[in-house]
Image (cartoon, helix red, strand yellow):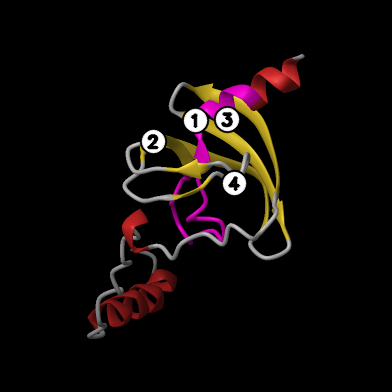
Amino acid sequence: MDDSAAPWLRTVAAIGSFDMPGAPRRRSITRDRLPSWDAASRPTIRVLERPTPDTVMISWRDACTGHYGYQKWRLFTTRRRGTCALSRRPIEIGDSVYSPQLLGSTPGNAAAMVLAACVDAARAAEAA
């Protein structure tokens, strides 16, 4: 072995021997624990595309919750009541809705929901 590498190998070995606490576990966010979305907020929402039957890409702009230019939303059956961010229609338990995908940091609009039927109507209106 080259003698010039020996100091680096000792340094790496020394770093590896430190008693370090494990990385903190990231808590998983579930939709049931999210605060309810403020229906008084008036975001500007555009349905950009629908890559799969269960996903939709949305552009969301709102002074309170932020700007998400190309955000993936997933289809699911809701277990809570709410208000559709796109149409302002009421959402009941058991409705099919789209909501922002929760990966990484929680977006400001994480609790928002859009009725699946409204996504279809918005896509049809933009195509016309």
Magenta stretch encompasses residue 54:
no
Residue at image location 23% in from the left, 81% down from the top:
17
Magenta stretch encompasses residue 113:
yes
* C-alpha span from label 3 to label 4: 10 Å
Of mark 4 and mark 2, the one earlier in the sequence is 4
Q: Please, what secondary structure does the residue beneath circle 1 have?
A: helix
Amino acid type assigned to the residue bearing label 3 in the image: Cys
**Along the horizontal axis of the image, is 61 left or right of 57?**
right
Q: Quadrant of the C terminus?
A: top right
Magenta residues (range): 99-121
Q: Which residue is mark 2?
A: 95
Of mark 1 and mark 2, the one earlier in the sequence is 2
* C-alpha span from label 4 to label 2: 14 Å
- Residue lying furthest top in this view? 128
Badge 1 crowding class, 10 Å Cα cut-off, few under 14, some 14 to 19, many 20 or more, is: many
Q: Which residue is mark 3?
A: 118
Q: Please, what secondary structure does the residue beneath circle 3 have?
A: helix
Q: Are discs 3 and 1 less than 8 Å apart at CB?
A: yes
Of mark 3 and mark 4, the one earlier in the sequence is 4
**Along the horizontal axis of the image, is 43 left or right of 22?**
right
Q: Quadrant of the N terminus?
A: bottom left
Q: Which residue is mark 1?
A: 116
Q: Position of residue 18 (x, y in %)?
A: 26, 85
Residue at image location 54% in from the left, 31% down from the top:
56
Q: Position of residue 47 (x, y in %)?
A: 65, 32
Residue 89 — which label? none
